[in-house]
Image (cartoon, helix red, strand yellow):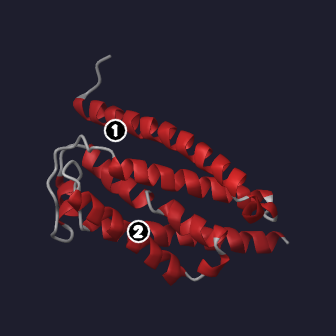
Amino acid sequence: MYYPMYLNDIMGFLKEVLRLGCMSILVAVVLYAALLLFLPKRFAGTGISVKIGQFLLLFYFSAFVIWSLLPCSMGRENNFIPFQSIYGSLCSRSEVPKYILFFNILLFVPMGALLPWIFPELKKWHRVVGISVCICLARELMQLILWYRVFDIDSLLFALVGSFAGYGLFSLAGRLAKKRE
């Protein structure tokens, strides 16, 4: 089927996201089953909402690691200059860089929401955002070492914005739950 060029770019990107998402679900199911099997006491006293959160966090981290370690099909170079990739994405004629920019921010929203839900000691926003940025930094340094991946300093900014937005959603959900009571 023929699509205009920008639609082909978007369709290819979405197919890649779907493929990696399916792989991540499979990995998360296997990991969660292993955790339930080998650490039953850790999961015995938790309610269904926490178990759902635990599975979502495993799925998220599986997707995060798979997405970060698989070879990148986009021919970009490492970026050590802050805001350079953001500017390049916004000025690009193709829609794909804009989607990548959006998805890089969206990538850290679940971390900002799930970490304080699963780990009560992480209820402070600065802890959640700090952990998210540190995880992003570790991922970017790993990608710098891997010859088939790309380092981008702007990803730290995306982690900051995304995890802060996720924490905001977590806080909003908590306030709405209290109002219902």
Q: Nearer the viewer, mark 1 or mark 2?
A: 2
Within 10 angstroms of label 2, few (less than 14), some, or many (20 or more) residues? some
The residue that label 1 is drawn on is 13
Q: Nearer the viewer, residue 100 or 33?
A: 33
Which residue is at a point 71% across and 74% down the rendered structure image?
Answer: 175
Q: Position of residue 126 (x, y in %)?
A: 49, 83
Q: Is residue 70 left or right of residue 175?
A: left
Residue name at image x 47 percent, y 69 percent? 163
Place of residue 65 in the rendered image (x, y in percent of width and height, measured from the top left) = 42, 53
Secondary element type, mark 1: helix
Q: Is residue 41 above or below residue 75?
A: below
For the question of whether residue 151 can be seen, the reply is no
Dividing the picture into quadrants, the one containing residue 44 is: bottom right
What's under tag 2, amino acid-wise? Ile
Q: Is residue 3 visible?
A: yes
Q: Nearer the viewer, residue 152 or 45?
A: 45
- Identified at 57% across, 83% down, the residue is 124
Question: Does 168 appear above or below 105?
Answer: below
Contact (Cβ within 8 Å) of mark 1 with mark 2: no
Residue occupied by mark 2: 135
Give the residue type that dot 1 points to.
Phe
| Placement of the N terminus among the 4 image quadrants | top left
Q: Quadrant of the C terminus?
A: bottom right
Q: Is residue 36 left or right of residue 47?
A: left
